[in-house]
Each structure stands twice: as C-alpha cells, then as structure tokens.
Amino acid sequence: MKEKYITAFDALERLKEGNKTYINSTKCAGDISPDKRLYTSKNGQHPFAVIVSCSDSRVIPECIFSAGIGDLFVIRVAGNVIDNIQLGSIEYAVEHLGCKLVVVLGHTGCGAVCAALEQNSGYVKYITDEIKHAIGDEKDMISAVTLNIKQSVNKIKDHINNIEDLLITGALYHTESGIVDFCHSTENKTI
C-alpha cells in the first residue's frame, strides 16, 4: 500500500500535490476502495499528516488533499480552534501513529470567525472567545482568519514541541478556488 512513516516535508509535498489534483476534480480522488478499507482494517491506520480543520461543510480535508482511507488524521472543530481535547488528539497522532506533519487548515468565509466579530452567548461563546483572543481588533476577514490560524499553530507548538522532525504549519483554504496556501511552512519546524 504505502510506507508506514514518511518525513514531514514528504507529507507536505504529498498534500500540495493532492491539492493540485483536487482543484480540477469533480470527485474525491483519494483511495476509498474495498481493498484499502480491508487493508487498514487489518493493519491499522498510518496517516501521513494531522489536519486540524474547521467543521464547515465546505471544507473536506480528504478531498482537498486527494487523500483516502487511512491517509489523514482529521480533527474538525468550528473555527479550527485548539483546546486540550484537540491537543490530546494531535498528541496521539504524533506519538502513537507517527505523524510528522500537523496542519491547521483555516478557510475563507469562516462562519466562526464572522461570529467572533459579533456578540455571542451559549456554547458558541467558547469558540468565539478563543477566536476573539486571536484576532483582537482585526476587522478584515482574511487577516482575521490568518491570525486565528497562527494562534492555533502557536498553541500546538507550545504544547507539542518535543517530537523530532515534527513540522507544525498553518494553511488557508480558498473555498471559491479550492487552492490551499501554506503559511510559512518551512519556518514552523520544531526540531
């Protein structure tokens, strides 16, 4: 099927190539075959990257990166915010599954970021308060989304930084074009 563990940079290149395939696709290009299901069922999962993405229904990491069953360890939460639950999931994927790449995937038109610019109550306030902390007084949507991505990347770096050859980076998914821009990916290495 595929090698069990790959480097962070190889994983990043695989995501970039997968995104290029996705941009002009009409269907998800990842391997979801019965053979792949059976293989991963018998041999376990060996994802090559962790993707922390927004829960937005327009953001489908497996499709965006042309990945299939067992390729990505995806953590979805509105606004791609990070708390102890997400950190625990990331830690599991890095320490137990051997992932060497963690990507925080924000996106244009993020409803959670929009909501953070408004007054909120109820449980959504837990999410919007995190985002407000990240964006401060920023009103420009793209800048706010980028600041929110950076805060999540920094939280991960602050808590999961003792893994050799681990790359933690942010990325911005453009919902209108399908293109993913990686944010300073080579500068976020934590060795």
Image: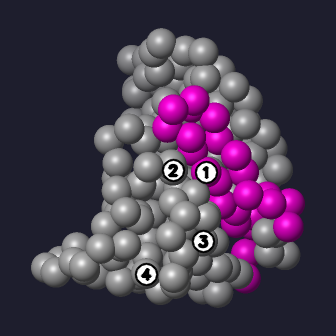
State the SS at label 4. Answer: helix
Give the mark, 3 or 1, whose residue is nearer the N terminus. 3
Q: Which residue is mark 4?
A: 132
Is label 2 in a helix, a strand or a loop?
Answer: strand
Whether tag 4 and tag 2 are in contact, CB under 8 A, the answer is no
Q: Amino acid at mark 1?
A: Leu
Using the rendered view, name the quadrant where residue 185 is placed. bottom right
Which of these two is toward me, 42 or 54?
Answer: 54
User: Which label belongs to residue 107?
Assistant: 2
Q: Are marks 3 and 1 in contact (CB under 8 Å)?
A: no
N-term mark: 4 or 2: 2
Residue at left offset 45%, top offset 15%: 27
Q: Nearer the viewer, residue 32 or 186?
A: 186
| Circle 2: residue type | His
Label 1 to label 4: alpha-carbon separation: 18 Å
Q: Residue furthest left?
A: 122
Mark 1 near mark 4, Cβ–Cβ under 8 Å? no
